[in-house]
């Protein structure tokens, strides 16, 4: 009986240590994913790529419908993100800067494109946002951590999910 209780004690200790190790690993993964969830990489025609921490930028909310389901989406407007990255908007968006476009890339490689003027508040009334919440709740892993929401688009084809990167690029010169 004593042998069995020593075995049981060792088994309990191992199970507890393994559970503690798993919990520690999960908490570390959670911390890593929460850091990733609050920042976005912006690169391209910026001179140098950068990562923006979205928690430091002003938030906006928009009402929008996707496939007939309405809701409130919250996040940061793409124009705010682009301004923080030094992209020319407003009065600076003219001449050769009108050839700039924004390519947004999802975790699975899906990509969408916006002409830079489509994201500039001087060209559009309703902001296009990089949302991290829908109806006051964080986006789930299928949608987030970030999703583009363009309330005035008639179809949500550019409402890209699981956004991982934003590139600002220049359309090539056609050379006519």
Image (tube, rainbow, N blue to C red):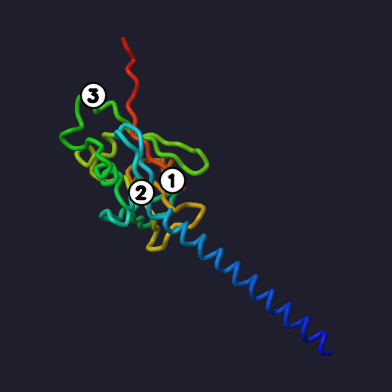
Of the pair 173 and 22, the residue shown nearer to us: 22
Q: In the rendering, at what x and y percent does residue 116 appear?
A: 29, 34
Which residue in the structure is indicated by mark 3? 96
Mark with earlier residue (3, 1): 3
Of the pair 151 and 76, the residue shown nearer to us: 76
Q: Which residue is at 73% across, 77% downward?
A: 11
Q: Which residue is at 34% across, 47% downward?
A: 151
The N terminus: image quadrant: bottom right
Residue 75, picture quadrant: bottom left
Instruction: Report helix, strand or loop for mark 3.
Output: helix
Q: Can you say whether 20 is above or below 88 in the image?
A: below
Which residue in the structure is indicated by mark 2? 130
The C terminus: image quadrant: top left
Mark 2 and mark 1: Cα distance apart in space: 8 Å
Which residue in the structure is indicated by mark 1? 163
Instruction: Report helix, strand or loop for mark 1.
Output: strand
Residue 101, picture quadrant: top left
Mark with earlier residue (2, 1): 2
Instruction: Report helix, strand or loop for mark 2.
Output: strand
Q: Which residue is at 44% across, 43% downward?
A: 160
Mark with earlier residue (2, 3): 3
């Amino acid at each position: 009986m004593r042998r069995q209780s020593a075995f049981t004690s060792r088994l309990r200790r191992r199970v507890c240590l393994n559970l503690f190790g798993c919990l520690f690993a999960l908490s570390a993964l959670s911390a890593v994913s929460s850091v990733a969830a609050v920042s976005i990489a912006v690169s391209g025609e910026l001179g140098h790529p950068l990562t923006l921490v979205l928690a430091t930028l002003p938030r906006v909310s928009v009402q929008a419908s996707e496939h007939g389901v309405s809701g409130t989406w919250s996040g940061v407007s793409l124009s705010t993100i682009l301004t923080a990255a030094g992209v020319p908007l407003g009065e600076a968006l003219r001449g050769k800067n009108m050839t700039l476009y924004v390519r947004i890339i999802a975790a699975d490689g899906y990509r969408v494109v916006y002409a830079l003027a489509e994201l500039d508040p001087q060209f559009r009334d309703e902001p296009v946002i990089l949302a991290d919440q829908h109806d006051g709740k964080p986006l789930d892993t299928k949608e987030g951590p970030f999703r583009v929401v363009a309330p005035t688009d008639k179809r949500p084809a550019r409402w890209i999910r699981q956004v991982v990167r934003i590139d600002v690029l220049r359309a090539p010169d056609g050379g006519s």
